């Protein structure tokens, strides 16, 4: 066996031993209050005097997306993960965006269709 200096040897794995994971300091109280403020803002959007309903929906969805990103980044610790997790995240986020955008016409045009149907029923009934 050749004499290899200790600093050039490959360290042997130690079985049953785990390395401590670095703990990231996160101010959970600040995240909590940010989520509370965004929730209050979401409720306030419902009372804003916007003329079009779709504007309220888009604004509420934008605020909800910000809240979801805070939860995912800090409470689910995605902020401290490697880059591969973001690649994996692309597929569900894409499906979520497709689902929400496909349902938006249902939400925005439902009052118009409802009023037209009610009017046609009243007209057919002779009222």
Image (spheres, grey):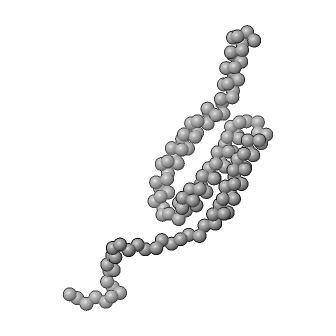
- In the rendered structure, the answer to whether residue 68 lies left or right of residue 55 reads left
Above-or-below relation of 124 to 24: above
**Which residue is nearer to you in this view: 16 or 120?**
16
Point out residue 76 in the picture as x, y percentages from the top left corner. Answer: 54, 58
Quadrant in which the C terminus is drawn: top right
Above-or-below relation of 37 to 60: below
* Residue at the spot 63% in from the left edge and 53% down from the top edge: 67
The residue at the far top in this view is: 126
The image quadrant that residue 108 belongs to is: top right
The image quadrant that residue 56 belongs to is: top right
Quadrant in which the N terminus is drawn: bottom left
**Which residue is nearer to you in this view: 22 or 112?**
22
* Residue at the spot 62% in from the left edge and 50% down from the top edge: 65
**Which residue is nearer to you in this view: 68 or 50?**
68
Point out residue 29 in the picture as x, y percentages from the top left corner. Answer: 66, 63
Above-or-below relation of 62 to 121: below
**Which residue is nearer to you in this view: 26 or 10?**
26
Total number of numbered discs in the rendering: 0
- In the rendered structure, the answer to whether residue 113 lies left or right of residue 8 reads right
Point out residue 110 in the picture as x, y percentages from the top left corner. Answer: 65, 29
The residue at the far front in this view is: 16
The residue at the far right in this view is: 49
* Residue at the spot 75% in from the left edge and 46% down from the top edge: 44
Point out residue 20 in the picture as x, y percentages from the top left corner. Answer: 46, 73
* Residue at the spot 50% in from the left edge and 57% down from the top edge: 86
- In the rendered structure, the answer to whether residue 7 lies left or right of residue 101 reads left
């Amino acid at each position: 066996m050749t004499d290899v200096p200790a600093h050039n040897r490959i360290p042997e794995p130690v079985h049953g031993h785990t390395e401590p994971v670095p703990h990231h300091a996160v101010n959970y109280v600040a995240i909590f209050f940010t989520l509370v403020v965004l929730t209050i803002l979401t409720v306030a959007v419902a009372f804003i005097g916007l003329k079009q309903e779709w504007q309220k929906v888009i604004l509420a969805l934008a605020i909800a997306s910000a809240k979801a990103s805070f939860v995912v980044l800090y409470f689910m610790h995605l902020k401290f993960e490697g880059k591969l997790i973001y690649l994996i995240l692309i597929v569900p986020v894409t499906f979520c965006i497709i689902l929400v955008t496909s349902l938006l016409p249902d939400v925005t045009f439902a009052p118009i269709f409802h009023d037209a149907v009610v009017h046609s029923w009243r007209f057919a009934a002779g009222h």
